[in-house]
Image (spheres, helix red, strand yellow):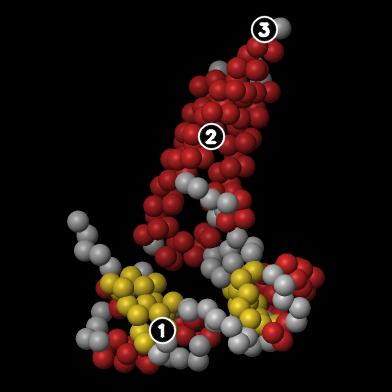
């Protein structure tokens, strides 16, 4: 009976502890979890399960690893926010699966993403034919972003956090030299000063980084 009371108390207590931890980690839909988030969630669930399963184990010994996992997640989130290379290394980036109605077979093989998965996700977005697709991107979350021909095409960023996105330039058949010339026309020589840049409606849209306070 005593063990049952301990298990009941720990279940309720750890429920609120985990709820607070998840709130501190930020709001994310399940389909939008990053690799870091997913690993942290699984480990926290395992720690909680061990704590409930073993009433003789000190509760502090279970709560401490959860707090440590929260700290790891917050620190890594801050690092990936500041460093795009680390962010891409951990989370990856969107991959072009379809371009102008052509399926990128090499990319699909590299990602171990099969045609059945592709056709299913196209159907879920009411797209009946690959030939209708202008661009389709497989996001790090596993979701497929589809842009149909003759509709609004995606506006791809050319500069993100001071780094040129050469892949996006290639997708839109432009070069880094072209981009630098456009920036020079606006008196910008240092790309690292730019937070975000895209080309929309025949105009280069630029947002510079805010000055550090």
Q: Identify the residue under disc 1.
A: 199
Residue placed furthest toward the top = 1
Q: 96 left or right of 70?
A: right
Q: Identify the residue under disc 3.
A: 2
Q: Residues within 10 Å of mark 2 (few under 14, many from 20)?
A: few
Q: 153 left or right of 1?
A: left
> Dot 3: what SS?
helix
Residue 123: x and y, percent? Answer: 75, 71
Q: What's the residue at 58%, 63% (across, down)?
A: 140
Residue 50 quadrant: top right
Q: 196 left or right of 48?
A: left
Looking at the image, is mark 2 or mark 3 nearer the viewer? 2
User: For the C terminus, which image quadrant?
Assistant: bottom left
Residue placed furthest toward the right = 116
Q: Identify the residue under disc 2.
A: 19
Q: Nearer the viewer, residue 167 or 142?
A: 142
Residue 112: x and y, percent? Answer: 72, 69
Q: CA distance from mark 2 to mark 1?
A: 42 Å
Q: Nearer the viewer, residue 44 or 147?
A: 147
Residue 130: x and y, percent? Answer: 73, 82
> Dot 1: what SS?
strand
Q: Is residue 4 visible?
A: yes
Q: What's the residue at 45%, 40% (across, down)?
A: 24
Q: Is residue 69 visible?
A: no
Counting residues from the start of the chain, the first of labels 2 and 3 encountered is 3
């Amino acid at each position: 009976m005593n063990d049952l009371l301990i298990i009941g108390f720990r279940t309720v207590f750890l429920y609120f502890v985990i709820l607070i931890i998840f709130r501190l980690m930020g709001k994310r839909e399940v389909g939008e979890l990053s690799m870091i988030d997913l690993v942290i969630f699984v480990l926290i669930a395992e720690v909680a399960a061990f704590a409930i399963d073993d009433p003789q184990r000190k509760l502090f010994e279970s709560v401490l690893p959860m707090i440590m996992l929260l700290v790891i997640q917050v620190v890594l989130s801050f690092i990936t926010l500041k460093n795009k290379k680390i962010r891409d290394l951990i989370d990856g980036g969107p991959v072009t699966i379809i371009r102008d109605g052509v399926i990128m077979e090499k990319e699909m093989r590299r990602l171990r993403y099969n045609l059945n998965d592709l056709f299913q996700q196209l159907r879920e977005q009411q797209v009946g034919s690959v030939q209708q697709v202008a661009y389709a991107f497989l996001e790090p979350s596993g979701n497929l972003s589809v842009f149909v021909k003759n509709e609004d095409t995606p506006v791809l960023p050319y500069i993100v956090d001071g780094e040129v996105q050469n892949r996006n330039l290639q997708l839109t058949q432009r070069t880094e030299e072209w981009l630098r010339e456009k920036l020079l026309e606006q008196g910008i020589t240092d790309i690292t000063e730019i937070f975000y840049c895209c080309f929309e409606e025949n105009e280069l849209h630029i947002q510079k980084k805010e000055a550090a306070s």
